[in-house]
Protein backbone atom coordinates (compact mmCIF):
# COMPACT_ATOMS: atom_id res chain seq x y z
CA UNK A 1 0.00 0.00 0.00
CA UNK A 2 1.33 3.42 -0.91
CA UNK A 3 1.69 6.17 1.68
CA UNK A 4 -0.98 8.26 -0.03
CA UNK A 5 -3.48 5.39 0.16
CA UNK A 6 -2.62 4.72 3.81
CA UNK A 7 -3.03 8.41 4.68
CA UNK A 8 -6.46 8.41 3.01
CA UNK A 9 -7.53 5.30 4.95
CA UNK A 10 -6.31 6.86 8.20
CA UNK A 11 -8.23 10.05 7.48
CA UNK A 12 -11.45 8.06 6.92
CA UNK A 13 -10.93 6.66 10.42
CA UNK A 14 -10.45 10.13 11.92
CA UNK A 15 -6.66 10.10 12.05
CA UNK A 16 -5.23 13.13 10.29
CA UNK A 17 -1.52 12.56 9.64
CA UNK A 18 0.76 14.37 7.23
CA UNK A 19 3.07 12.48 4.89
CA UNK A 20 5.97 13.75 7.01
CA UNK A 21 4.44 12.39 10.23
CA UNK A 22 3.80 9.01 8.58
CA UNK A 23 7.40 8.88 7.35
CA UNK A 24 8.59 9.55 10.89
CA UNK A 25 6.40 6.71 12.17
CA UNK A 26 7.82 4.36 9.55
CA UNK A 27 11.36 5.43 10.39
CA UNK A 28 10.74 5.05 14.13
CA UNK A 29 11.47 8.75 14.67
CA UNK A 30 8.07 9.40 16.24
CA UNK A 31 5.81 7.46 18.58
CA UNK A 32 2.34 6.40 17.45
CA UNK A 33 -0.67 7.34 19.53
CA UNK A 34 -3.15 4.75 20.71
CA UNK A 35 -5.71 5.99 18.18
CA UNK A 36 -3.14 5.74 15.36
CA UNK A 37 -2.20 2.19 16.40
CA UNK A 38 -5.82 1.07 16.42
CA UNK A 39 -6.47 2.60 13.00
CA UNK A 40 -3.28 1.15 11.50
CA UNK A 41 -4.04 -2.31 12.88
CA UNK A 42 -7.54 -2.15 11.38
CA UNK A 43 -6.32 -0.95 7.98
CA UNK A 44 -3.53 -3.52 7.79
CA UNK A 45 -5.66 -6.35 9.27
CA UNK A 46 -3.13 -7.09 11.99
CA UNK A 47 -3.23 -6.84 15.77
CA UNK A 48 -1.89 -3.90 17.74
CA UNK A 49 0.35 -6.45 19.48
CA UNK A 50 1.88 -7.35 16.12
CA UNK A 51 2.47 -3.68 15.30
CA UNK A 52 4.24 -3.19 18.62
CA UNK A 53 6.20 -6.45 18.88
CA UNK A 54 6.01 -8.34 15.61
CA UNK A 55 4.46 -11.26 17.51
CA UNK A 56 1.22 -12.90 16.47
CA UNK A 57 -1.73 -12.14 18.66
CA UNK A 58 -5.48 -11.87 18.83
CA UNK A 59 -7.00 -8.82 17.13
CA UNK A 60 -9.28 -8.37 20.14
CA UNK A 61 -7.97 -9.14 23.64
CA UNK A 62 -9.67 -11.94 25.57
CA UNK A 63 -10.56 -11.22 29.18
Image (cartoon, rainbow, N blue to C red):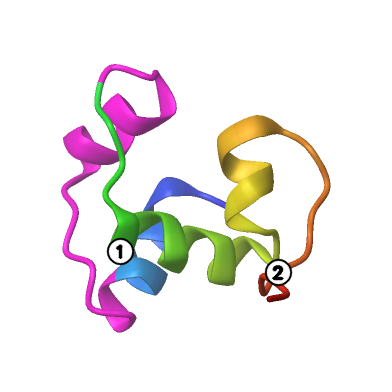
Residue appearing at x 43%, y 67% in the figure: 39
The reply, left or right, for residue 32 in relation to residue 41 is: left
The reply, left or right, for residue 25 in relation to residue 44 is: left
Packing grade of label 2 (10 A; few <14, some 14-19, many >=20) is some
- Between 20 and 39, the one lying in front of the other is 39
From this view, report whether residue 25 is shown above or below residue 6.
above
User: What residue does disc 1 label?
Assistant: 35
Residue appearing at x 73%, y 74% in the figure: 62
- Between 60 and 32, the one lying in front of the other is 60
Image mark for residue 59: 2
Residue appearing at x 42%, y 29% in the figure: 26
Residue 10 locus on image (x, y percent)? 34, 68
Q: Secondary structure at mark 2?
A: loop
Residue 38 locus on image (x, y percent)? 44, 65
Residue sitting farthest toward the front: 63
Quadrant occupied by the C terminus: bottom right
Amino acid sequence: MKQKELLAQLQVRGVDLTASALSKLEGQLRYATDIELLALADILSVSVLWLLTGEEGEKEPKF
